[in-house]
Amino acid sequence: MTKPLNVGLIGLGFIGKIHTTAYRNIPLCFSDPPVAARLAAVLRSDLGTEVELMEESRFGLRTTDPEEFFNQSLDIVDICTPNVLHMEQVEQAVQRKLHVYCEKPLAMNYEEARAMAQIAREAGVLTHVAFVLRYLPAIRQMKALLEAGRIGEILNFRGHMYHSGYLDPDRPMSWRLRHSQSGGGVFADLGAHLIDLLHYLMGKVAWVRAATKTYISSRPVSRGATEREEVDVDDWALCTMELESGAMGVLEVTRMAAGAAEETALEIYGSQGALIFHISQPNFVRYYDLNRKMWSLGAIDVPEFPGERPIGQLWPSGKYSQGLMTDAHLASAYDFLLCVAEGKPSTIGFEAGLATQEVLEAAYLSAARGGERIDLP
Ligand SMILES: NC(=O)c1ccc[n+]([C@@H]2O[C@H](COP(=O)([O-])OP(=O)(O)OC[C@H]3O[C@@H](n4cnc5c(N)ncnc54)[C@H](O)[C@@H]3O)[C@@H](O)[C@H]2O)c1
């Protein structure tokens, strides 16, 4: 029997559309899934676009009125709005004892994230943050190999996420480029994913030193406008860090890498081997075994990490793949639906969002102080 859960979606921009596609396609990718999302309502700032998508997705209610939205019978509120709105919308959902799936970064800053985690904990609702890279089969293989101690003591690591979307100086202003709406630039946007991966794979961060740069310091207020607005967030960031384990590493993110569409990688080097993830091979991690002096790829002879749902239950088979972005968001949304149906906490709850926010905040403080070392509590 498939249990239907009523999902209320807030925001139908870029990622809201991907979440919508993910919910709709769960029954396509899995036979008789134990749970399904009913798209009960969508709350938007404007109902004039994505009209066909809203019709096809059979949203029970389409509205711009939060009261009307929250008056629906909902099980889960899925927040896909600019970062500045996350806290207020989480509060509205939690007050009504609704479970919450929130996009990353969880909040504008550490204080907000802490308050959000606290109110959700006190209300006893389930939470989930869209750190979707955790669902890539290659990342799950990395986790299994690390848990099995296959690369020995972790010595150092290097991660990057390079995008090119903001190279065009005529690209107009948007919420991502305003600190007052985003809470940070590319490090908050893309760096958040990598920080979460570090937490997931290797544990907590001990200290950071960071540098940031804004290459294009003003942009047209709207497409084609001559009037310009100051950009007060980072286009590029580099963060060096030590983990509590003693491992040293570096993360670099940018929106200004020509030719990089979605260029993401994480390399981890240990005393007994190495692990290399590259986004071009999301299904397989490359593993170097120092004892055998051999690289291998793909199927691994270690059990999956037992603390989470097996990825085979969540990741669409190759034949149903709708591309990496949608597959990863489908796995994440499906995992949370299953958590809610089972009444079990997600492994990526608001505490994970809070932990990431703490590192983001320390890195921005370090950058503001010229790369000073900032110790995490
Ligand atoms: N996990 C990921 O892979 C991923 C990828 C992209 C974006 N994101 C995150 O998703 C969130 C949204 O990003 P995006 O790229 O979709 O932005 P976007 O600008 O494309 O979409 C945001 C949408 O929110 C709507 N909106 C604004 N105010 C609203 C309100 N008061 N009520 C309802 N809707 C409102 C806007 O009209 C817009 O359609 C951000 O937190 C972002 O960091 C995550």
Image (cartoon, helix red, strand yellow):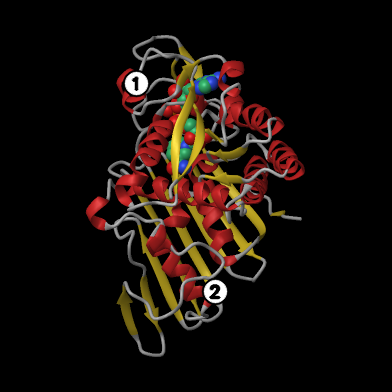
The residue lying toward the viewer, choosing from 52 and 186, is: 52
The reply to whether callout 2 and callout 1 are in contact (CB within 8 Å) is: no
- Identify the secondary structure beneath mark 2: strand
Residue 178 sits in quarter: top right
Tell me which amino acid carries mark 2. Leu
Judged left or right of residue 253, residue 68 is: right
Which of the 4 quarters of the picture holds residue 225? top left
Q: Kindly tell me whether residue 220 is visible in this rendering.
A: yes
Q: Position of residue 112 (x, y in %)?
A: 70, 36
Q: Which mark is residue 50?
A: 1
Q: Residue at x 48, y 28 (%)?
A: 40
Q: Residue furthest front?
A: 1
Q: Is residue 235 visible?
A: no
Question: In this rendering, is residue 297 above or below 183?
Answer: below
Q: Secondary structure at mark 1?
A: loop
| Foreground pick, 219 / 76 | 76
Location of residue 204 (image quadrant)? bottom right
Which residue does the image show at 61% across and 54% down from the upper left? 344
Split into 4 quadrants, where in the image is the C terminus? bottom right
Residue that sits furthest to the left in the current view: 319
Closest to the observer: 52 or 17?
52
Most extreme residue toward the bottom is: 291
Q: Residue at x 63, y 64 (%)?
A: 243
Q: Amino acid at mark 1?
A: Glu
From the image, state whether disc 2 or disc 1 is nearer to you: 1
For residue 155, the mark is 2
Give the image location of residue 360, x and y in percent.
Answer: 62, 45
Residue 150, image x, y percentages: 47, 81
